[in-house]
Image (cartoon, helix red, strand yellow):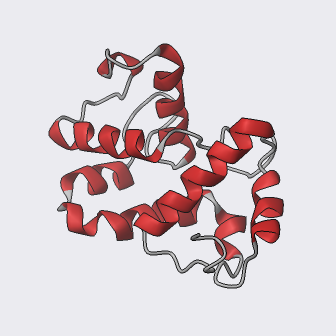
Amino acid sequence: MAENTKVAVPYLPWKTFVSVLESLAKFLPDQVHTSMWPTYAGGVKSQIIATLSFLKLIEANGTPTPLLKKIVGADKTTWPSLIKEALAGSYTSLMACDLTKATPGSFDAEMRKFGQEGDTHRKAASFFLQAAKFANVPLSPLLTQ
């Protein structure tokens, strides 16, 4: 998926994403659909699907990809390396940067290439940084504060 302004970059709360993975680890259907999470609001359900799609964990029709099957079938101790694989495949230009040398400004400039503004941009940056920390992606100390 090309990185451009039409990409629905994740801005779901990280804890919600982890909860979704945990639910999929208990039961992974042939097609992931918003009806799987009846307690979430409609907007959150849409964000879940968009996040799974962006990270290439589901196909356009909701079919789980091999990477999603690998994640939910694995021991949770291996999740960080698998999430790192998802990040590398989805945030290609951002992951190609030397994030150990990034400043908040340079990171913000890279994140803005995804086309989000305002609160959505802030949430998208937060999602990426929390995912990167979880996946043990080396980050500048200026990004981890």
Give the answer, above or below, for where 88 lies relative to 34: below
Q: Would you say residue 115 is visible in this rendering?
A: yes
Residue positioned 43% across, 30% down in the render: 62
**Image quadrant in which the C terminus is located:** bottom right
Numbered label tally = 0
Residue positioned 36% across, 29% down in the render: 32
The answer to whether 46 appears left or right of 79 in the picture is right
Answer with the quarter of the image where residue 107 lies: bottom right
x, y (%) of residue 88? Answer: 56, 66
x, y (%) of residue 144? Answer: 57, 71
Q: Would you say residue 7 is visible in this rendering?
A: no
The answer to whether 88 appears left or right of 66 in the picture is right
x, y (%) of residue 92? Answer: 66, 65
x, y (%) of residue 23? Answer: 24, 36
Residue positioned 81% across, 52% down in the render: 112
Residue positioned 39% across, 20% down in the render: 40
